[in-house]
Image (cartoon, rainbow, N blue to C red):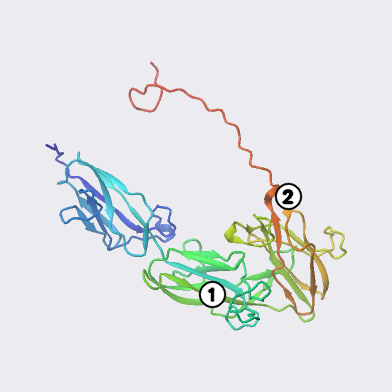
Amino acid sequence: MNVRSPQEDTVSGIVFADNNGNGLFEPLLGEVGLPGVEVFLDTKADGQIQGFEPNQISGPGGSFGLDVSDVDSGSYQLLQILRTGFTQTTPTALITVGDGLSTVYNFGNQPQTLITGTVFEDFNSNGIQDFGDTNGNGVLDPDEFVERGVPGFQIYVDINNNGRFDGLEEPNTFTDTNGEYAIVGLLPGTYTLRIIPRDVITDPNDPTATSQGFIATTPTDLTITVDEFENSNLEIDFGQSPVLPPIGRANISGIAFIDDNGDGQAEPLDGDRPLPNAIIYIDANENGERDDDERFSLTDQFGRYDIPEIDPGTYIVRQEPFPGFTDSTTPQPVIITLAAGDNADFVNFANDPTNLPPAVLPVVDLGGIVFNDIDGNGQIDPG
């Protein structure tokens, strides 16, 4: 026979959209309650909802509450019936019933909507990422031209549709070294997706001196609709045409990156990542060192650099040695011939990290006392 407390046992909580998948309910980051999700106490321990088991469908704010007073004392799993297009991010709860306990538990569910795409250099301004299929096989071969992706563009979802980026409460990301981006976890709905224009630094000694670096060749804001079904995965590309240098001049740009496998190729999927604060310079006198009068640029947080408005000619472009890294750029040295109006983009520099010293972990002496904590207060008490 189960002896019950005269108090009622209750289980309550909130089912919420865990947009960032960390298992925490964070309304300040735009996370909201999910209505219409059925929650139940699995008294039969079969993972299925039965008509006699305590259950409730979450309300408008995602809240639910179960009266479990009539359930025999014991421990039971609290489960939910997941909506299509969501993944649970919180662990399964084991609820103890009896003695008038009131238990609060929240269910986190991450939407599995996904928006991906590429920001690419649209040289012919046709709004399509082209490649020169010279042999007609429909495949991009190593010797064929491609309009490549551009790193460092910011893409965001304009939640309040005010035409500007309002910070972390609006889902956002930057394109990687291949110009690719991904935004995960939007709730079903209709949104405006925007790209922020990217300027270039015109004076390496003055980061505030900038000019327009690209002209959009595709819409910079798009209305999108995402749902749990056919619109759960969207692919949206943005075309950007590089702004031509002034008449009679040329531009050089590219990235510096950490080349994990030392092959000289930027491969984010293999762990390669941008290298900020690297100095790229034009070795005008070809002495292998950067002199005070030579043009240079410092890479930003995305590894990007720009050396604009250069006279036509042939140049050696180098990266100053970066402590702990070996230059794995191929070929070496980097020799660029520029004609008037040229945009020499993707002049990239690879940095092999194999010479980085191994991490040294501090030696810590651990010690202590094992004691009989009679009163259970976690302290060693006198006597």
Quick check: 66 above or below 169? above
Q: Position of residue 23 (x, y in %)?
A: 40, 52
Quarter-wise, where is residue 81 in the image?
Answer: bottom left
Q: How far, Cα to Cα, is label 2 from label 1?
A: 37 Å
Question: Dot 2: within a 10 Å radius of its alpha carbon, few (fewer than 14), some, or many (20 or more) residues?
Answer: few
The dot on residue 360 is: none
Q: Residue furthest top?
A: 383
Q: Which residue is mark 1?
A: 237
Residue at figure coordinates x 63%, y 61% from the top left: 302
Q: Are marks 2 and 1 in contact (CB under 8 Å)?
A: no
Q: Secondary structure at mark 1?
A: loop
**Label 2 secondary element:** loop
Q: Give the crowd class for mark 1: few <14, some 14-19, many >=20 residues within 10 Å.
A: some
> Looking at the picture, which amino acid does disc 1 mark?
Asp
* Quadrant, the C terminus: top left
Residue matched to label 2:
323
**Vertical placement of residue 151 versus 324, above or below:** below
Q: How many marks?
A: 2
Q: Quadrant where the N terminus lies?
A: top left
Of residue 139 and residue 240, the one placed in the foreground of this image is: 139
Decide if residue 241 is on the left or right side of residue 250.
Answer: left
Residue 307 position within the rendered picture, expressed as x and y whole percent measured from the top left: 74, 68
Give the x, y percent position of residue 22: 43, 53
Q: Is residue 41 visible?
A: yes
For the question of whether residue 170 can be seen, the reply is no
Residue at image coords 77%, 81%: 247
Q: Examine the image and state in which quarter residue 217 appears.
A: bottom right
- Residue extending furthest toward the left: 1
Sequence-wise, which precedes: disc 2 or disc 1? 1
Q: Residue at x 58, y 79 (%)?
A: 138
- The amino acid type, in three-letter code, at marker 2 is Pro
Q: Is residue 176 left or right of residue 210?
A: left
